[in-house]
Image (cartoon, rainbow, N blue to C red):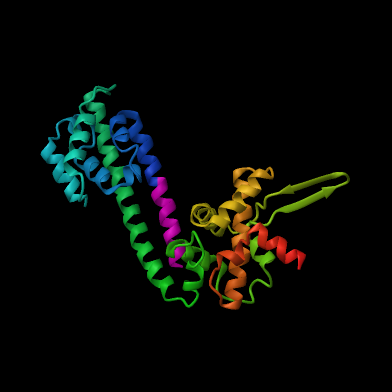
Amino acid sequence: MLARAQQDAVWARTGAHNKLRSHLREYYPAFLGAFADARGGITRPEARAILAAAPDPAAAAALTTSQLRALLRKAGRRRGIDAEAARLREVFHTLQMRQLPLVEQAMGRQALALLRQLDAACASADDLEQAAIASFDQHPDAGIITSFPGLGPLTGARVLAETGDDRSRFADAKGLKAYAGAAPITRASGKTLAVLHRRVKNQRLAAAGYIWAFSAITASPGARAHYDRRKAGGDRHAAAQRNLFGRLLGCLHHCLATGQHYDEATAFPSPATTTRAAAA
C-alpha cells in the first residue's frame, strides 16, 4: 500500500511540476533557465523557495545577493551559497522578453497557486518514501531483493509490492515475466512471424522494472554486457532494457524461492565459463 501510494505521489509531483513549468515558460523563462542544469530542476527546495519569494521577473530582479543567500540557507543549502547567490542574481538581471507588468503580476499569482500544489506533492512523496522504506526494511525478503544491482530500498519496495510474497502466486519465472511485461509475445500467421512486447501487464511493476534495469546497467558489469549483447543483436534500447529486466526478474524469482542472495557470477556467467560448462 505504501509503495503504491508513494508512486502515486511521485506521479502527482510530476504532473504538478509540468503544469508549473508550462506556466513559467509563458512569462518567466529566466527562472527556468536558472535551474535548468540542476538535478530536480524547479522541484528543488531552493528553486521553490526563490519562486515563492519572487513569483515574477520584476520581483526576482529586485532580490539582493544577501536576500538570495538567505533564501538558499532557508531552503537547506549548505555549500556554495555565495557563488550560487551571485549566479542567480546575474541570471535574474539578464535582459529578456517581458510581458506587461500587470500581466506578469497576474501570472505570478497563478504561479504561486501552482507552486502550493507542487509543494504539497513534494512533501507527500518524501513522507511516503520514508514510510515505504521503513516498512520494506522490516520485511524478511528485503535483504535478498536489495542484494540485486540497481534495486535500492524504494525500488525494491515497489517490486515487492507488485509481485507479493506469496511463493505460490507464480509457478515459474515465465509467469512472473509475463505479469511484468518483460516476456515478449510471438504471433504467427502463415509465413508471417512477429515478436512484440506485451502491452497487457502490471504497469506499476513495469515502471519499477524500467528504473531497475536502467540502474543495473551501470551497477553490474554482467547486466551491462547483457544489454550490450542485445543491442549488438539488433534490439533497440527499450527492447534490450526490457530483456534485461526479464533476466533480472528470473534471477529474483529463483533467489526468493531458494532464499539466496544475488550472485553476479551465477546471474551473468562469463562466456568462457559458459563454454567450459557446455563442453563438460
Q: Residue at x 54, y 55 (%)?
A: 221
- Magenta stretch secondary structure, dominant: helix
Q: Quadrant of residue 103?
A: top left
Residue drawn at x 54%, y 65% as measured from the top left: 162
**Front residue (pair 241, 192):** 241
Question: Where's residue 186, x and y in %?
Answer: 76, 52
Q: Is residue 66 left or right of residue 215?
A: left
Of 8 and 146, nearer the camera is: 146
Give whichever of 101, 192 is nearer the camera: 192
Question: Relative to residue 126, is residue 253 drawn left or right?
Answer: right
Front position in the image: 156 or 278: 278
Q: Is residue 4 magenta?
A: yes
Q: Would you say residue 235 is visible in this rendering?
A: no
State yes or no: residue 276 in magenta. Answer: no
**Image location (x, y in percent) of residue 276:** 71, 64
- Figure check: 175 above or below 101: below
Residue bounds of the magenta highlight: 1-15
Place residue 50 in its image quadrant.
top left
Question: Quick one: quadrant of the C terminus?
Answer: bottom right
Q: Position of residue 246 (x, y in %)?
A: 63, 59
Q: Which residue occupies 20% across, 44% down?
A: 80
